[in-house]
Image: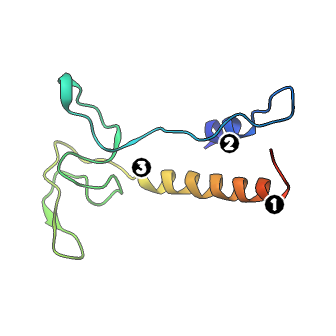
Amino acid sequence: MRHVTDVLALKGADGRHPVVGIDWWTFTDKTVGGERTNFGLVTTHDNAYDGREARVQKGADSLGRPIGKEDRDFGDFLTGVTSVNREVELILRREAANGRK
């Protein structure tokens, strides 16, 4: 969170804020070119990194769709991402209301 808000607070010598946005994650993990990193919001098995779906144990979500069957259990990444995105939205709305350039 701190990194994102620090970037949003950057200001040029002319008083303008040069940051338009931050592109950090992809929707799903990368698997091409030998790259097997957890860089997405969901796994290659389409399990969300929400602390419930991305896990070893197989199961079903509330709609009956299969979840689990991962190599290991992963924690809750999405709550933090959601929180940061909400904070960014609040900052931008506040700045827009104050006439931020």
Ranked by sequence position, the earlier of labels 3 and 1 is 3
Q: Which residue lies furthest to the top in this view?
A: 33
The spot of residue 34 in percent (x, y) is: 18, 23
| Left or right of 69, for residue 2 | right
Q: Which amino acid does label 2 sit on?
A: Thr
Q: Residue under label 1, please give it.
A: 97
Q: Against 56, is 66 above or below?
A: below
Q: Quadrant of the N terminus?
A: top right
> Looking at this view, is 72 or 7 the one in front?
7
Instruction: State the count of labels.
Output: 3
Secondary structure found at label 2: helix
* Cα distance between the residues tagged 1 and 2: 18 Å
Ranked by sequence position, the earlier of labels 2 and 3 is 2
Q: Residue under label 3, please give it.
A: 77
Q: Which residue lies furthest to the bottom in this view?
A: 63
Q: What residue type is labelled 1?
A: Ala
| Left or right of 88, for residue 10 | right
Residue at 72%, 59% in the rendered image:
93
Q: Against 19, is 57 above or below?
A: below
* 10 Å crowding of disc 2: few (<14), some (14-19), many (20+): few
Q: Quadrant of the C terminus?
A: top right
Residue at 33%, 52% in the rendered image:
49
Looking at the image, is mark 1 or mark 2 nearer the viewer?
Answer: 1
Q: Against 62, is 10 above or below?
A: above
Residue 29 sits in which quadrant? Answer: top left
The spot of residue 10 in percent (x, y) is: 75, 33
Secondary structure found at label 1: helix
Q: Which amino acid does label 3 sit on?
A: Phe
Secondary structure found at label 3: loop
The spot of residue 79 in percent (x, y) is: 47, 57
Residue 5 marker = 2
